[in-house]
Each structure stands twice: as structure tokens, then as C-alpha cells.
Amino acid sequence: MRDKKKPGKSLDAMPEKDSVVRHFSPVSQSRRDFLESTGATVVATAAVSALGLSTASAQQTDPGAAARTAISLTVNGTLHRVEVEDRWTLVELLRDELDLTGTKIGCNRSECGACTVLMNGTPVYSCSQLAVWADGASIQTVEGLAQNGQLSPVQQAFVENNGPQCGFCTPGQLMTATALLMSNPSPNANEVRDALVGNLCRCSNYNAIVEAVVAAGAGEMQGGAA
């Protein structure tokens, strides 16, 4: 842009022009600024037309407003009645609203399994479940495994068999293993591998994880839950 302090004609001394002409004066606005502002206007107008909305109705819509729905769900045995934005995922509700941060967000696209929780006893990726879909559901997170200060059998088996490494994937591994042990109290190594195929470990500690789940299903540790 031109330096306004350099010698030249004073803006006050210049003859008054039409307001549109003044707006596009090279002194007050650079060519880059002009192109960026007009380009944004064109894109916005095209978007409104494509959606079949009138310009007036589009201007009246609050872009910051989001639809909200009141839901109720039971998490780790506690009933919660909350109002959620319809765009929130279940993991966002658990972490940001209920402060249950044990559930981790890994890939955020249903690939790594770090966000696995149990919904009505079934393992689900909470990053790919909308919070509104959990209305009326029973959710169990990793925080719900230990009871009265005692680790669940599967948690204890992970500790004894060095299952966790960095620990980021561990909550998801524990929840999937818990679901497996509820349906199959004494799985063998191959059955554990099949069940945990959707839970990735970036530390590649798979052998220890499999050993931990097999151990959790043995003897007094049957069921994987206290």
C-alpha cells in the first residue's frame, strides 16, 4: 500500500467523489484487499443461491446458532439429563460436558479404537456416535470399570502383564476386552486377537495385551469385571 506520509496530494484537498469511488481509492485500499473482499462477497452470494435461500432470509439466520436437543443417558450407573448440540459426538459429550476424560480421541474417524466405550454392553467408537443417538442408552467408560477403589480383573491383568505402554490406547483396549469377557469368560489368544482387531496400539504392544486379556479370563478373573 502507498505510504500516506509521503509527499503528495492531501486527501482533504481532493475533490469529493462518489462514495463507491472513494471506497476503492488505491490510497485507502490495496488491490489485494479489494480482490479479497469482493471474492468473499461473490462466494457468499453463490452459496446462498445454491441453497435456494433469499438474501434477506440468509442474513436473518444466525450462523453461530446450533440446534440443541435434550437427552437423558446413564453413564457408569449415573443418570444424566443434558442438552446437547445435535452435531456433538458422544466422545465430546463424555469428555467436554461430563468431564470423563479417560475416553481418548485418537484418529477421530473410526480407525484406531482409542475412544471405545460400551453402549448397552456393545463396544462402539464414541467419536463416530452422535450424542443424540445415545438418548436412553446405558454407557460405560473406562472410569466405570474400577469399583470401590479396586481395579477390575481386566485392569489388574493389564498391570500385571505390562499391557499399557504409552497408555493412550489402553482405555479403548480395556473396554473392548471387558465386552469380550462378558460374552466369552475364557477366551483363547486367537479369540482375543479377533475381538481386539479394531483397537490399534501405536506402541505395538499387542502380545502383552493379548496375554493380559487371556489372563483376565482365567480362574477367579472370569467375566472381566468385579
Image: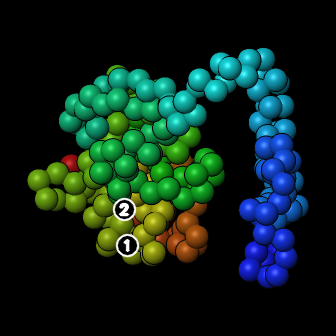
Near-viewer residue (108 or 215): 108
Front disc: 1 or 2: 1
x%, y% of residue 80?
Answer: 25, 32
Mark 1 lies on a secondary structure that is loop
x%, y% of residue 17?
Answer: 84, 47
Near-viewer residue (121 or 89): 89
Query: Eyeballing the image, is 112 above or below 81?
Result: below
Please name the amino acid that badge 1 sits on: Asn
Residue 85 visible in the snapshot: yes
x%, y% of residue 197?
Answer: 60, 53
User: For residue 49, which quarter of the picture?
Assistant: top right
Judge from the rendering whether residue 56 lies leftward or rightward of residue 210; answer left or right: right
x%, y% of residue 100?
Answer: 31, 51
Residue 225 visible in the snapshot: no
In this figure, which residue is indicated by the disc labeled 1? Answer: 161
The N terminus sits in image quarter: bottom right
Mark 2 lies on a secondary structure that is helix
Q: How is the image coloured?
A: rainbow
Q: Residue furthest bottom?
A: 6
Residue at left offset 82%, top offset 24%: 50
Earlier residue among tags 1 and 2:
1
| Disc number for residue 215 | 2
